[in-house]
């Protein structure tokens, strides 16, 4: 099966404007993510951006990028436009890797791709074990609940996603910013109207669950930190700049 990795990106993020071009170790965040996706070596990698500055930055750093509309409500709508513009007919799976996850583990990207293929799944994502109890109350950390324990072998269905923990369960995990769709599932997803649940919680994956699309989840080896705030950026810089020293 052939996989295409598309990374949605835009400068107008409300909580941290301009974040794709913020530098870590002298390289923009979006280019860090692009290079991680390339190193995973599961297929061609493209950045889908609404800003010419992002396109130029990615290309300057040796990546591929495609300009999309600035009218998209979600990253998934953006990657679908990019997929249509690429006009490739031999793709089976489309990986949506968030552009603000520069710490995403390369092995985890490979794990998700492998589980999608082995299980013939329609839509999959990643989650990690929550070791710091404070994260349960952090609304910037998206949690997911499964009906069974998540381990290195299985690929269970997700029951729900939330920013706040309302439902009591022993199977609560940290959701990571990555999805993998079959082409048909991606087409179905973008044709659906945004659900009220999705809009209220600012979680586009709820649109899938609200419309009966199953989402499977694989256990990630490490917890990636998405960059939503200045504090996140400082934390990631500390980690990534320490690794280089």
Image (cartoon, rainbow, N blue to C red):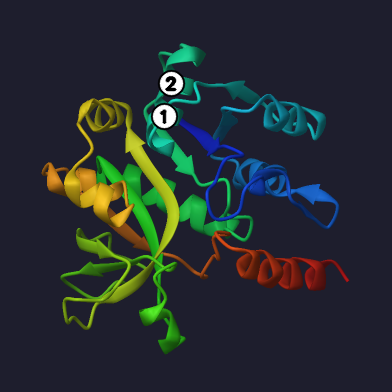
Q: In the image, 91: left or right of 35?
A: left
Mark 1 Cα-neighbour bin, 10 Å: few <14, some 14–19, many ≥20:
few
Q: Quadrant of residue 121?
A: top left
The residue identified by callout 2 is 81
- Residue lying furthest right: 245
Label 2: element kind:
helix
Residue 219 picture location, percent across and down: 38, 66
**Residue 13 in view here:** yes
Q: Residue at 63%, 28% (x, y): give it.
A: 51
Q: Earlier in the sequence, mark 2 or mark 1?
A: 1
Residue underneath mark 1: 72
Is residue 215 visible in the rendered image? The answer is: no
Residue in view at x 58 percent, y 30 percent: 49
Question: Could you tell me if the residues under marks 2 and 1 are in contact, i.e. CB atoms within 8 Å?
Answer: yes
For label 2, count other residues whose C-alpha is less than 10 Å away and answer few (under 14), some (14-19) or many (20+): some
Q: Nearer the viewer, residue 126 or 162?
A: 162
Where the N terminus falls, by quadrant?
top left
């Amino acid at each position: 099966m052939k996989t295409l990795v598309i990374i949605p990106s835009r400068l107008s993020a409300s909580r941290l404007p301009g974040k794709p071009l913020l530098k870590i170790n002298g390289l923009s965040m979006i280019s860090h993510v692009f290079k991680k996706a390339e190193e995973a070596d599961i297929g061609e990698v493209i950045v889908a951006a609404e800003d010419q500055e992002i396109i130029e930055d990615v290309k300057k750093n040796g990546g591929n990028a495609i300009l999309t509309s600035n009218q998209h409500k979600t990253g998934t709508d953006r990657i679908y436009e990019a997929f249509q513009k690429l006009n490739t007919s031999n793709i089976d799976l489309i990986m949506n890797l968030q552009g603000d996850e520069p710490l995403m583990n390369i092995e985890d990207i490979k794990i998700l791709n492998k589980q999608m293929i082995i299980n013939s799944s329609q839509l999959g994502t990643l989650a990690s074990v929550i070791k710091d109890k404070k994260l349960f109350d952090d609304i910037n950390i998206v949690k997911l609940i499964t009906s069974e324990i998540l381990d290195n072998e299985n690929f269970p269905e997700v029951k729900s996603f939330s920013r706040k923990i309302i439902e009591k369960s022993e199977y609560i995990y940290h959701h990571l910013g990555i999805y993998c769709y079959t082409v048909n599932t991606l087409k179905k997803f973008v044709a659906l109207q945004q659900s009220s649940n999705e809009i209220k919680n600012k979680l586009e994956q709820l649109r899938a669950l609200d419309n009966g699309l199953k989402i499977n989840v694989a256990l990630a080896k490490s917890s990636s930190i998405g960059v939503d705030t200045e504090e996140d950026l400082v934390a990631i810089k500390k980690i990534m700049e320490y690794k280089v020293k």
